[in-house]
Amino acid sequence: MSTRQRGRLVREIADRRHIDPFGAQVQIARATLDRWIRRYRAGGFEALVPEPRRLATRTDEQVLELAASLKRENPSRTVAQVARILRTATGWAPSESTLLRHFHRCELMGPTAGQPTEVFGRFEAADPNELWVGDALHGPRVGDRKTYLFAFLDDHARLVVGHRFGFAEDTVRLAAALKPALAARGVPAGIYVDNGSAFVDAWLLRACAKLGIRLVHSAPGRPQGRGKIERFFRTVREQFLVEVTDTTAEDLAAAGVDHRGALLELNRLFMAWVETEYHRRTHSETGQAPLARWEAGWDRRGGLPGLPTAADLTEAFLWSEFRVVTKTATVSLHANTYRVDPALTGRRVELVFSPFDLETIEVRYRDQSFGAALAHTITRHAHPKARPETVEAASPVATGIDYLALTAAAHHEQLRRDERIGYHALYAPGTEVTTAAPGQRGQVPGQLSVTDLDSDDANEGEVSA
């Protein structure tokens, strides 16, 4: 074939698509075909066979073995430290990437090089109410305000014993989720939570102590023990929150609801999803529905759990702080002053109260009640942490009062009443102001002339009008 014919043929081959050995359609570039032709002419078919990869290292084996020995001698040594030692001892060292690849080939990196990897067992509580796991989840935005979900999960049955959405991740919202759970599901033997600000509050420790609950906090940086609640939150995000859209204040105004009503609706929808879907669907880990596993566990133990009394719950969810009684038999609590029994002067007493009512304070000393403290000075009616869920602003009402117009009218009336110079008295009755001719000074008939004051009589101190 001539050069022109061969070039035309190569171009046609390059324009077509071909099937490779794996069944995919490929297109070979003209430059690649030319390179293959040159190789075939130079060495035949053998020249077209790809060369095997060179696996032999180009670094001296003795240097690599010395590096491996240094690593084995002290597994805590980093690659950079081994390279630094080699340069100091031999005057040269391979690159750190070369040493890192060699250490991986010799299995000197990772868990096998140092301490053995910690293995976590698959723990599960043997019975219901043996352990509850609690945590908080960031929820959707309702009326431009962020929401938080507090939830408690039974470790044995995976049952959601308590839950509540709120506008804050604080102690009050945590209590709103935990108190109904205790009233409906009984008192657990222990509660396992993280180190969030709401879970380390002194109130939660007091509530658990009053009810006989063992409160356990996870170690910082070790979330493995809360895997069940985290997996539940993943289910909440994938099946519930994916159907909830964020709303703005304008959206709520258009729908005719406020923030409180929207939050109540969110909690109602979540409760319906939990009771209808989550509790009645077979759990992938236990093979049972959470509600069925919960009931089966109590049937095995001979009956449903005993519920705490209303008085016990009320006492557990009260807050308390300690104060020293002054010499005037008073104590102070958050800028408020109270009078107590004079017999407690100088003693450290416990003030028990509801966070929403700082006017009613019970005084206790050594677990003995000394009655209610008498309010002396009240400047705060609720605890600083007991912030309301929503602060609804009063809708403005048109009064029809024009403040500026009233001010202008008052100013006019004041000028009229306090006028000291009666300018109208300077004019004689029945006279009119005349306009003087150009170049002459105008004079009002009957008006006192200023020139009259310049007479000789004025120089003598006498003025006649």
Image: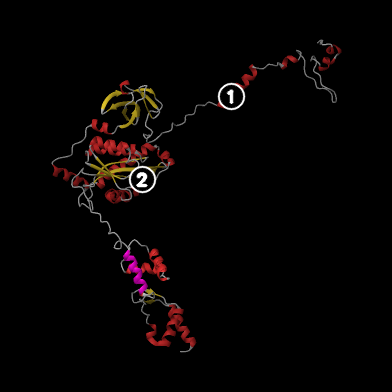
On screen, 33 above or below 101? Answer: below
Residue for point 38% across, 65% down:
82
**In the image, is 299 to the left or to the right of 74?**
left
Please, which residue is most extreme toward the front here? 89
Residue 167 percent coordinates (x, y): 37, 40
Give the residue number, with chain letter if any, for mark 2.
139
Write down the region rendered in magenta. 62-73
Visual colour scheme: secondary structure
Give the amino acid type for the residue marked by disc 1 in the picture.
Thr
Spatial CA distance of label 2 from label 1 is 51 Å
**In the image, is 454 to the left or to the right of 6?**
right
Residue for point 14% across, 44% down:
300
Please, which residue is most extreme toward the bottom here? 1
Give the amino acid type for the residue marked by disc 2 in the picture.
Gly
Residue for point 25% across, 34% down:
210
Q: For residue 263, what is the image quadrant?
A: top left
- 143, 153: nearer the viewer: 153
Instruction: Give SS at disc 2.
Output: strand
Residue 285 percent coordinates (x, y): 22, 53
Residue 46 percent coordinates (x, y): 37, 85
Instruction: Give SS at disc 1.
Output: helix
On screen, 93 above or below 322? Answer: below
Residue 349 percent coordinates (x, y): 31, 28
Residue 407 got which mark? Answer: 1
* Quadrant position of the C terminus in the picture: top right
Most common secondary structure along the magenta stretch: helix
